[in-house]
Amino acid sequence: MPNIPNFRIRKLRTWSPGKKSSELIGVDENNNQIKLIDLASNDYLDLARHPFLIEAARQTLEADGVGSGGSRFITGSRNIHQKLETKLAEWLNREVVLLYPSGFQANLAAVLALTDRHTTVICDRLIHHSLLVGVKASGAKLIRFKHNNLSELEALLKKSKQINPQKQPLVITESLFSMEGTTAPITEISKLCIKYDSKLLVDEAHAFGVMGPEGRGESFGLQKPISIISGTFGKAFGGGGAFLATDKLTGENLIQNCGAFRYTTALAPPLCASALAALNLIESNPSWGTELREKSIAIRDKLSQMGWQRPAGKGPIISIILGSDELALDYQKRLEKQGILTVAIRPPTVPEGKSRLRLVIRRNTPLKALEVLFKVLKNK
Ligand SMILES: Cc1ncc(COP(=O)(O)O)c(C=O)c1O
């Protein structure tokens, strides 16, 4: 294998060598296969195998087929796309929602729609890779502020306005940070964007369904200066695919000028149907997000009582920063031997020296899993 600089070689591991792919399999201390309880995936609301979603996808699969067979401007647009876009726009109180095959692609599209090579993009240091790829593709100037640091953001906004008073900068943040578990101060960031006349793009990939009022995201209720919100169905919605929510003008620009929307096969109809079913479930269970957050906070409390530094944040992603790759991998292995699947997150996904165990708490995480987790983490 060629030596790739600054890149740690990873092996792809299949977690489901058993008969049922829904069963995650690891190895215990005697090297025997063991069923694992999942404390790693982003299926926060346990919807990926929910009968309501499966039935909705099945019915659409039978009626509309597996794939859409074309882009939205050719033959790909179906009623189910429009239904989902309309319902999401209503739920989020945004003028326009457009579907994309993945969150990665949606983010790329969003950045390209809001920038050109003269734009200054000011983003949180820890935003998702897809957004950085978008900035690079746009040719815009990239400046980063320390994670969630409002005074640094303000200083950069001020400077950008002084250098180029005619050109609106773009601020980018996630709302629930995928690897930190922290939430961005969206209201304060919005106020700064208004003060310095900047656009704002918020990636709510991990937040929808879980954070904000009734799971509608951390930026729900804020209009100006938010230009685009991006979301994915691959996490709390239990499926796949993604969307951008925006105003009419930006939406029209995305439809007419955005290659990532026009020149790609439309989201598979069964995935649209499952996303719509997930949305209906989330809407009719408005307390799911709050309950999950309360559970996650209780786990943070317990970890700090046990002598760990209290993991940052208030949502279902709980990052225990361990420092070295070896230590993070050691905890992953120790938990796997006890039947718990967690994944050590290491550079380049996180900064050097910040390797961690990323725990994901789900709506139906069994108490037993937490007991095992606490037992293993007790032996520091
Ligand atoms: C913050 C964030 N944004 C966007 C994405 C991309 O979403 P998708 O998996 O739908 O491509 C991810 C997925 O890992 C993410 O964590």
Image (spheres, rainbow, N blue to C red):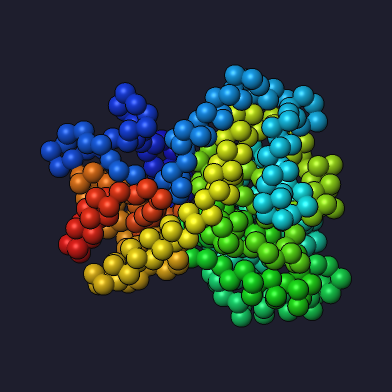
Q: Image height check: is 63 above or below 168?
A: above
Q: Position of residue 214 (x, y in %)?
A: 56, 57
Q: Quadrant of residue 262?
A: top right
Residue in the image at 74% along x and 36% along y: 82
**Closer-to-camera residue (230/64):** 64
Q: Residue furthest front?
A: 284
Q: Which quadrant of the figure contains the N terminus?
A: top left
Q: Position of residue 376 (x, y in %)?
A: 20, 56
**Closer-to-camera residue (173/13):** 173
Q: Quadrant of residue 293?
A: bottom left
Residue in the image at 72% along x and 49% along y: 89
Residue in the image at 53% along x and 38% along y: 239
Q: Quadrant of residue 264?
A: top right
Observer able to see residue 83: yes
Would residue 134 be found to the left or right of residue 356 on screen? Answer: right
Would residue 245 be found to the left or right of residue 10 on screen? Answer: right
Q: Position of residue 238 (x, y in %)?
A: 50, 41
Q: Image height check: is 63 above or below 342?
A: above
Observer able to see residue 98: no
Would residue 222 be found to the left or right of residue 102 on screen? Answer: right
